[in-house]
Image: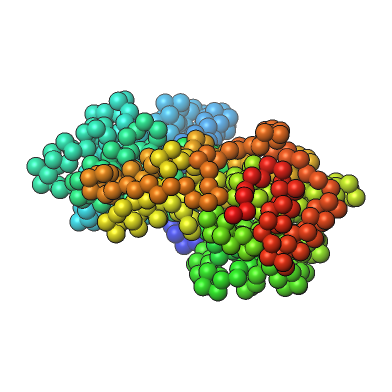
Amino acid sequence: MNRLRRLTPRQWLIVLHDLLVTAAALAGTLVLRFEDQQLAARLQWLPTLLAGFLVLAAGVYFFVGLHESKWRFTSLTDLARIIRASAVLSIALLCLDYVLLAPNFYGTFFFGKITILLYFVIQTAFLSATRVAYRYFREVRTLKRARDAVPTLILGRAADVEVPLRAIESGAMSKIWPVGLLSPARSDRRVTVRGVPVLGGFDDLERVVALLRQRQTPVGRLILTPSAFDPGSGAESILMQARRLGLTINRMPSLDETGQTLQLAPVAVEDLLLRPSVKIDYTRLEKFLSGKSVVVTGGGGSIGAEICDRVATFGAARLLLVENSEPALYAALETLATKPSQTKIEGRLADVRDRERMIRLMKDFKPDIVFHAAALKHVPLLERDWGEGVKTNVFGSINVADAAVEAGVSAMVMISTDKAIEPVSVLGATKRFAEMYCQSLDADFARRGAAARAPRFLSVRFGNVLASNGSVVPKFKAQIEAGGPVTVTHPDMVRYFMTIREACDLVISASSHGLGPERTDVSVYVLNMGQPVKILDLAERIIRLSGLEPGRDIEIKFTGMRPGERLNEILFAREEANSDVGVSGVVAARPVSPPLDEMRAWLAKLEQALKREERAALYAVLRDAVPDFTGVAA
């Protein structure tokens, strides 16, 4: 009864419609099947029969959920429900006819097998037809409105292009009129997908645009689905052709990328640089973060802000952003305020160098997990201002770790870098030193207490993040907009790149392993960054995607390697063992870690060197603690 009371007026109308259709189908079947006296005799009994049969039909329809679906989105699932309901009612008629009516009341079969089969067909057709017709007329009306929009070509495989076509039909995506499809698959040629023809492959773009222009349908927009960016698909060539033709270019993000409604996004060079993204186990991340209290230091930076976004997405109960830049904190909080999330979000201005402030904030907030993303990370600047790098990256990280201990956290996760492996810069050495402190702290707690209850101190390494603050991609774009030259340090320099979203999802994945049931002594994780990208190739690509030619329209200038840089980044040090942890995109590293007492002795020496501003003494301590460090005090 409670479920009946919760039915909406629309659902009651659907129930009434289906019962009227049932009565009409049963009466219509008798009219079609019988004539004259046979029909008259059966119609005499029909009102009595219908009274009980409609009650049964209502129960069957309610059980299979015919009233729950919106007719505007009628699908094969809804048709399957109709077939199940019609089959149940047909079997009920068969039992009624053969068990009750024929032997006890009527003396012969009231319906008969052929009549019941005919009823099943008519009933299914009637219930389906009204729903399909309603959907058809709604879609026709939507598509008529779409014809006033910009004629659009959609690029991708049939399975991919169906997603935006459905969204256009339902009205979820407006102001788009799909006039044709281009697919890389030959099996898709000369077919239609939801009424839109496949006009050729990706190589046929210019021909198809010219053909449609002749037909008075000037294409103004391209939409690229995820399969248009598959390796070997020629996405870069497509974009260059589209720019020459003056077409607006958008991409359709994957469902995993949005997690919400599909929206068009601009195509960026980042879409062309990457391998296929690692498959993320989002259910695992939701279980890990759901209901947790989380602190993110550096929450206004590129990585910190994205971690905050993911923490809120995956259902954390509370989130505290710690940031020392007032504009960055304000911008991050404003962005998070627009997100549909139940997470209670707070922000605090604080510097990780302020030990007392960090301890007080952590104790008051009582987090379960701390993500430490606050850092100084620009290599040449830290080579010049080396003391600032030590204060933030070493002592700031230690302040956060010790504050996490005081607050009784389950885990602290430090964002590290591939530059910490056999470091040649202050950035790499300070990050490796902070890693070692966290390793030592993690091992010390594991020795002192029950492993299952001991807090974890984890580090996650990865390379450059596309479009982050200080990234080379926005720098190149700005240089191109200014007319050049585009500056590259060395023709052979290569770097690893990841998107911010993938990097942060994998950071949380690694953290879930460190605290999960598979909990091991691993405390340093390295993300799978795919193949490195040559910076010169990247610069040339961005120039071409801007509709220009490298060397002719935009000069590329080599400026020489800067202090602290090396040509190639590496993933593991020579003495580091590594192993798979069973989490896609994440590998465990096992670097050597000294005891906590030894780490604290080095910290005391670092502090003294900082006070005296003795760069050589500070480098000596870093080389003593990190033997692979080969930086030179200039």
Which color mode does the image show? rainbow
Vertical side of 3 occupied by 118: above or below: above
Residue drawn at point x = 10 percent, y = 47 percent: 216
Residue drawn at point x = 31 percent, y = 25 percent: 187
Count of numbered circles in the view: 0
Residue drawn at point x = 68 percent, y = 49 percent: 432
- Which is nearer the eye, 318 or 84? 318
Q: In the displayed structure, does residue 618 sit left or right of residue 496? A: right
Quadrant placement of the C terminus: bottom right
Residue drawn at point x = 56 percent, y = 60 percent: 384
Question: Residue 573, how many percent across, how many down?
Answer: 66, 37
Whether residue 492 is visible: yes
Q: In the displayed structure, does residue 416 sit left or right of residue 221? A: right
- Which is nearer the eye, 327 or 159? 327
Q: Classify residue 412 by image quadrant.
A: bottom right
Question: Residue 612, how many percent across, how many down?
Answer: 72, 66
Whether residue 54 is visible: no
Question: Residue 588, how many percent across, how many down?
Answer: 69, 38
Question: Residue 360, how many percent across, how many down?
Answer: 76, 72
- Which is nearer the eye, 381 or 234? 381
Vertical side of 162 occupied by 383: above or below: below
Quadrant placement of the N terminus: bottom right
Q: In the displayed structure, does residue 16 sit left or right of residue 412? A: left
Vertical side of 99 occupied by 169: above or below: below
